[in-house]
Image (cartoon, grey):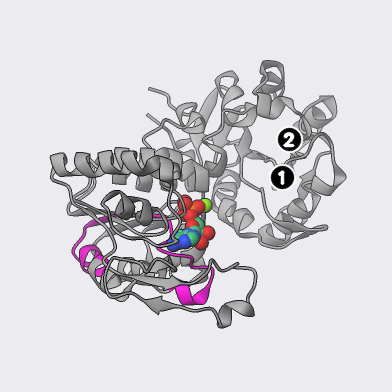
Amino acid sequence: MIRYIDELQLTGKRTFIRVDFNVPLEGRRVTDDTRIREALPTIRRALELGGKVILASHLGRPKGPDPKLSLEPVAARLADLLGPKHEVILTDDCIGDGVKKQVKDLKEGQVIVLENLRFHKEEEANDETFSRELASLADVYVNDAFGTAHRAHASTAGMVPFVKEKAAGLLMKKEIEYLGRVLKNPEKPFVAILGGSKVSDKIKVIENLLPKVDVLLIGGAMAYTFLKAQGVEVGKSRVEGDKLSLATRLLEAAQRLKTPIVLPVDHVVSDKLPNPEDKDKNKDILARETADNAIPTDMLGLDIGPKTREMFTQHIRDARTVIWNGPMGMFEVAKFAEGTRSVATAMANNKQAVTVIGGGDSAAAVKEMGMAEQLSHVSTGGGASLEFLEGQELPGIKALETR
Ligand code: ADP
Ligand code: MG
C-alpha cells in the first residue's frame, strides 16, 4: 500500500520532498519551467498542511560540484511561482551541519531548496552513509519525482527506510493511478498503440501488454521490422535485421492469444531520411503515399498512410482504455506528422475512454500539437513510464510501499 501526501499530518514536521527539477538551462536561465510548475501542487499542499518544506533534486549530469549546474536559477524561478508569501532559501550543499542548521531554523512559509544532489557521486551510487545524511534532515519523506523513480538512487530509494514516515506526492499519485489502472484493471475494449524508432526498445512493453489488450496497433519505424518479418517489401526503411525472428515470434504469440496485432496497410514514404534539424530543406523533401503496405525498393517509410490513420482512428474511437507509446512517424518533420496527429486526435476525441500516454517523444508530440490537456494523463517520465509499462517494479515506487 502507498500513502499519499494528503493523508499525512505534517504540522511542524520536516518534510523532505524529492522533486524533479531537472529542467533545461541556457546559461543561468531556465528555458522551460514545466517541471517546476508540475511540482507546485505538492509543495503547496505540504505548506498548507503545516510542513517545513525541504526540496531536493538533481540537475543535469555533474561530475562533482559544478556552479553551472547549481539549482540557483531553479530556486529563483520557484520563488517567482510561489509568490511573495514564501521565501525560497537555496543551501550551498545538500548534506552537512550547515544545512542541518538551516533546516532547524526554517520559519513558517519558508522553503528550502537543497543544492544539486548529484554534486555528490554517492547520490547515484545509492551510498548508505549519504542516504542516512539526507534522511537525518527529514521527519517525513515524500517522493514526487516520477521521472527518476526507475533509478535506485540515495534520494529515490536509499534514504527512505531511514525516515519515519513516507508518502507519494500528488504528481506521483497521478502517475501511479493512471499507469496502474491501465495495467491492472483497464475497462474494455482496451487498445494499445505502439510506435517509435526501435522494436528492441519496446519488446518488453509488447510482451507485457499483449495478454492484456484487445488489440495492439503498431506504427512508427518499428512497424517495418514486423512487415519485413511477414515478407512484405519495405524498401530502404529502417529494419532491425536481428529482430526479425523475434517479430515473427511476437506475431505468433498474438495469434495464439487471439489478440490482433494491426500493422500499417499504407505509408507515407520518401527517397531519403530527413534530418529533423534541417527545417528549410525539409520543406522540399519528397513525401508520397503508397497504394498498399509495400514500399518501393528505392523508398523508405516515414509515417503511416491515410488508410492506416483511418483504421487506427476507428479502433481508438470504440475503446474504453487507450495506452499509447511511440510516435507513428518522424513527427519532427511536418510532412510526416499526420499519423501521430491523427492518433492524438482520436484519443482526444474519445471522451468515454481513459487515455494515457507514456514515453518522452510521444509526450513531447502531443504537447507540441496542443492536445495534452484533452487526454486523461500524459506521463512526465519517459524512461520511467516505459519501465512501468514493461511491468517492472520501479525502485522509487517500491520504496514507498508500506504493506
Ligand atoms: P518514445 O520516446 O515516445 O518512447 P521513441 O523514442 O521510441 O518514442 O521514438 C521516437 C522517435 O522515433 C522520433 O524521434 C521519431 O522521429 C522516430 N520515428 C518514428 N517513426 C519513424 C520512421 N518511420 N522513420 C524514422 N524515424 C521514426
Ligand atoms: Mg524517446
- Residue 303 figure quarter: bottom left
On the question of residue 157 being in view, the answer is yes
Magenta-colored span:
312-337
At label 1, which amino acid type do we have? Gly
Q: Position of residue 359 (x, y in %)?
A: 47, 51
In the rendered image, residue 333, in percent from the top left (x then y), is placed at: 53, 72
Question: Which mark is on residue 115?
Answer: none
Label 2 vs 1, first from the N-terminus: 1
Q: Residue at horizontal 58%, vertical 36%?
A: 11
The quadrant where residue 176 appears: top left
In-front residue for pair 128/220: 220
| Residue 263 left/right relative to 71 | left
Q: Position of residue 387 (x, y in %)?
A: 44, 38
Q: Tell me which residue sits at (30%, 46%) in the image.
A: 182
Foreground residue among 193 and 40: 193
* Label 2: which secondary element: helix
Query: In the displayed structure, would residue 28 be above or below residue 383?
Result: below
Q: Residue furthest bottom?
A: 284
Residue at x-position 71% and y-position 21%: 130
Question: Where is mark 2, residue-wise?
Answer: 118
Label 2 and label 1: CA atoms lie apart by: 8 Å
Crowding near pointer 2: few (<14 within 10 Å), some, many (20+)?
A: many
Residue 201 in the figure: left or right of residue 11? left
Q: Position of residue 284 (x, y in %)?
A: 56, 83
Q: Which residue is mark 1?
A: 60
Above or below — where is 171 with respect to 237? above
Q: Is residue 1 shown in magenta?
A: no
Q: Is residue 64 left or right of residue 196?
A: right
Please identify the quadrant where the N terminus is shown: top left
Can residue 85 be seen by looking at this rendering? no
Q: Determine contact: label 2, label 1, CB under 8 Å.
A: yes
